[in-house]
Amino acid sequence: MHSASQNARRSGTRRRTRLAALLSIVALAGLFSTTVNGTTAQAQETDENGYPTWAAVEAARGNEAAKEQQIKEIKALISNLEDQAAAAQDHAREMTTAAAVAQDAFNEARGNAMYLDEQAAKAAEAAEESKKQAAAMTGEIARTGGTGNMSVELFANPGEADDYLYRLGMMDRVSGTLSVSYEQAQKDANTALALKDQAKVASDKRDELYQEAQQAADDAMAAQQAAEQAVTEEMDHRGELEAQLSVLEEDRAATEADYQAGVEYRAELERKERERREREEREAREREQNNNPGTGTYTPPPTSDPPVTNSGWTRPSSGWITSHFGMRSDPLGQWGYVLHDGTDFSAGCGAPIRAAAAGTISQIGVDGYGANFVTINHGGGVSTSYYHNMYPTFRGWGEYVNAGDVIAYEGTTGWSTGCHLHFILQVNGMAQDSVPWLRARGVNV
């Protein structure tokens, strides 16, 4: 079943194709009329987007100087389209990586704040326990110490002198222990206070980096959108510009095929793009298998797709969960005790990775550690990201995907100990534990 947005895109494509054909026919009819009447109408030089019209191209053919100038301008437009598309794509890649780095910095700060909060809570608990112990000892001294006047006690209770002297010795030892207990209680209280202050600083830093990560994500999305628009502009106009250039350089009249060149060129580029993605996916699989003999064997897709629940969510991987969300020691031994901001699934190198829910591809790229990733925006502030893929994704930026659609294949790119999917769920930019989220939506994880 196709989504409404997909149907709308296809309808829009059909309308543009029909419109292009109609405009071509009208243009040819106009040129034919001009030729039959034996007159040259005043040609509109550019269209609303600043590109030369076919009428202007035909008019330039009759004047050598005008033709050479038109050829020069068209070549400059083609070169400019290429440069703009390439620059926009490079910028989008840089901004996407920067956004991933900013997110990593925020996650590190968040993990540090969580750790300090835990330590402060433990220190406060230890201080309270030390305080209770010191108070209990104080009570014991008051209970067993008698009047505190030794001569009175001995005169009043001559038969209990030995017992009383024994209790005095115990009191002395208890008093020494009490002093130590009070000192420990004070130390624990000071430690708790210091850790609380550190946690506050860490929390402020976390909040600051959260804003930076959100801004970086917005900037990356804007850059990818600009890149998509630049590529679309090139696809929309380059074919027609090259056809116009051909007409001028060959000094011939334009044909119906020339007018349709833009539509045909776009279709050809889309075909080549599909082939490129399929080739890169295939090569990535082969590299992964060659680099991981034995443990890197390819895992074929399951015979049946993971079920999509009534909530619209499904498992992103058929593999076992190998690491949960939360604080843990870095398995590669470089970063110490850190926040693991996702859930790791392992189904084997090359195993399919599926969209956990329907949404739009919002980020495609490589993070600061070299891991290929793709992000899906599900709306309502909810997004999911899929890391360590063999190739970021063979889907296009802005493409709509359904729950359960294959979007990538499991790899071990970046900061990884082996082939697995690092699955991140974010709600309003904050990583959450995906397991209870999925279970609450009927997914078996």
Image: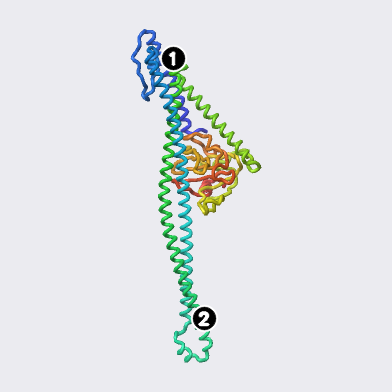
Residue 230 image offset from top left, x and y in percent:
43, 30
In the displayed structure, does residue 189 sit left or right of residue 307? left
Determine the residue located farthest toward the left in the rendered image: 42
Instruction: Give the residue at mark 2.
Output: 170
Q: Residue 101's x, y, as percent?
A: 47, 44
Colour scheme of this structure image? rainbow
Q: Callout 1, which amino acid?
A: Ala
Residue nearest the observer in this picture, 378 or 202: 202
Which is more toward the observer, 434 or 123? 123
2 or 1: tag closer to the N-terminus: 2
Amino acid type of the residue tagged 2 in the rendering: Met
Instruction: From the viewer's perspective, tell me whether residue 288 is left or right of residue 270.
Output: right
Q: Residue under circle 1?
A: 254
Assign a secondary structure to mark 1: loop
CB within 8 Å, label 2 to label 1: no
* Residue 141 visible in the displayed image: yes
Q: As displayed, is residue 87 above or below residue 99? A: above
Q: Give the spatial CA distance, label 2 vs label 1.
A: 114 Å
- The label on residue 35 is none
Residue positioned 45% across, 63% down in the render = 192
Q: Tell me the SS state at disc 2.
A: helix
> Residue at 49% across / 34% down in the picture?
396
Residue 69 position within the rendered picture, expressed as x and y whole percent measured from the top left = 38, 18
Q: Looking at this view, name the residue that lies furthest to the right.
A: 294
Classify 10 Å Cα crowding around label 2: few (below 14), some (14-19), many (20 and above): some
Density class for disc 1 (Cα within 10 Å; few <14, some 14-19, many ≥20) is: some
